[in-house]
Image (cartoon, rainbow, N blue to C red):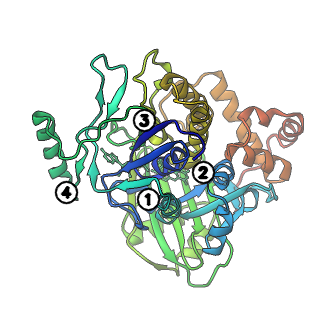
Amino acid sequence: MNQSVGDRAVVLGGSIAGTFSARVLSEFYREVIVVDRDQVVSVSRPRRGTPHAGHAHGLHARGCLILEELFPNLLRDLRHAELPVGDLGEQRWYFNARPFRSTRTGLPSVTAQRPVLEGYFRDKVAALPNVTFLERTDVLGFLSTPDARRVTGVPGAFEGSECRKCIRSRRRSARRRHRPRIAYSGLAGGAGIPATGRAADDDRSGLHHTALPTLPGHAQRHAIHQLHHITPVPARAFFGQVDHTTCILSLTGILGDHPPTDPDGFLAFAKTLPVADVYEQIRHAEPLSAPACFRFPASVRRHYERLPRLPERLLVLGDAVCSLNPNYSQGMTVAAMEVMALHRHLSRGTPSTVAFMRAVGRIVDNPWFISTTSDLKYAGMKGPRGLTARSGNAYVTRLHHAAVKDPAVTNALMRVAGLIDRPTALIRPRVLLSAMRRQGSGSGPAR
Ligand SMILES: Cc1cc2nc3c(=O)[nH]c(=O)nc-3n(C[C@H](O)[C@H](O)[C@H](O)COP(=O)(O)OP(=O)(O)OC[C@H]3O[C@@H](n4cnc5c(N)ncnc54)[C@H](O)[C@@H]3O)c2cc1C
């Protein structure tokens, strides 16, 4: 243990952000309890609490580097497990149907089945002597001091059930009776960390992902990642090898264009992509399951950092703060960046909630800017198109053209996408010059 900050910390949600948090908290608290409504330990398949986990997840460079620090030998272990660990710039990126010039960036990137990746981290954390996972347990809320200035416990966490209807009715009756079956209190000197994801957010029209795990007809030892960002038709494909025999193809449609979930419709949608080889590679592959659809209504950000007062001993992170458009593969990396901030704050003693949430706000600013500004390039996307958004998107489109020829531009774009550099790095003279030179270069389909 690094330095004792308190007796007990309770983490609400044992998914990505919760597991990363528990890893950091274990250095500072005598006891760390991770509560999740699902069974999570040793589970390496999609589960009810994370319905998006059927889609391939890419862990970006910044996330890889941070997590290698928290979980030494991470990349070595993943390679041993035959998960594709590659260089971000050597993956095959297509924008507007044209391929970026491949280049070695030195930035790691991992693509994996999400439950496998999540399971790797959770097994490591569950093995820590002072961490306990309290599974199949639903969290109802918090206990606080009468003036609501400090959280004192996590009440009404009770044994969960597979049936959501039962959970909802039990939650209602528990609230009525104030008689939870298991109640955690006594966070004196402790902390409550909600990492319960985006949970129940407003439903708005947005993204539809349909994923199909496939077993390719021929062995592909190397990861293949293809991204088709097709403007003005907003569709996207992520096709990647996720272990030594399996590929996942995630198709994304937005603004009402939904990739179908029947196998023939799914294949037909893949055929409409302007780069033919995704379709060519999957049409003879053996599907491992029926296509699964995940509806992502909207990116959501909660500005806790703007609140002048927050209850002490309650720190929020992960998708519970900000759920970003999955097209940019940022969520897990942002969670990793937030837990590093948690580490810094805990190193100085009991963290102030307001100070920590401001730090989280600063971390979220950049990925939120990248994702929400990029979304605005689609004509039907709602949102204010100020000068920054319009000129920024026009400039990035030029960079996408420049990256077809210039590996230095691919490198610059990958460093921003990998959350290593801020978007302002894209206006460095070398990159700017290349963008100006390639002005107006063609963007026809690459069939
Ligand atoms: C389709 C899709 C593809 C994505 N692809 C990528 C990608 O390629 N790369 C990337 O970095 N990110 C990606 N993301 C984002 C990433 O999945 C999220 O950022 C990440 O899952 C956030 O983790 P989290 O722990 O904050 O929340 P979640 O993963 O949502 O987990 C929340 C946890 O809290 C538990 N929980 C909720 N409520 C309660 C309660 N009341 N009591 C007890 N437990 C509770 C749930 O069971 C769950 O385990 C993608 C997201 C989607 C939707």
Q: Is residue 116 above or below residue 155?
A: below
Residue at disc 1, CB closer than 8 Å to ligand 1: yes
Q: Residue at 57% x, 25% y: name it.
A: 385
Q: Secondary structure at mark 1?
A: helix
- Give the label, 1 or 3, closer to the camera: 3
The dot on residue 53 is 1
Mark 1 in CB contact with mark 3 (< 8 angstroms): no
The dot on residue 163 is 4
Task: Judge the density around disc 4: few (<14), some (14-19), many (≥20) Cα neighbours within 10 Å.
Answer: few
Q: Residue at 43% x, 47% y: name it.
A: 31
Decide which of 146, 216 is in the foreground and name it: 146
- Give the label, 2 or 3, closer to the camera: 3
Mark 1 in CB contact with mark 2 (< 8 angstroms): no
The dot on residue 444 is none
Measure the C-alpha gap from mark 2 to mark 3: 49 Å
Q: Residue at 37% x, 24% y: name it.
A: 150
Measure the C-alpha gap from mark 4 to mark 3: 32 Å
Where does the image place residue 117, in percent across and percent down from the top left? 53, 62
Q: Secondary structure at mark 2?
A: loop
- Give the label, 4 or 2, closer to the camera: 4
2 or 3: tag closer to the N-terminus: 3
Q: Is residue 167 above or below residue 354?
A: below
Q: Residue at 19% x, 49% y: name it.
A: 167
Whether residue 369 appears in this view of the structure is: no
4 or 3: tag closer to the N-terminus: 4
Q: Residue furthest bottom?
A: 218
Q: Amino acid at mark 4?
A: Cys
Where does the image place residue 302, in percent across and percent down from the top left? 44, 29
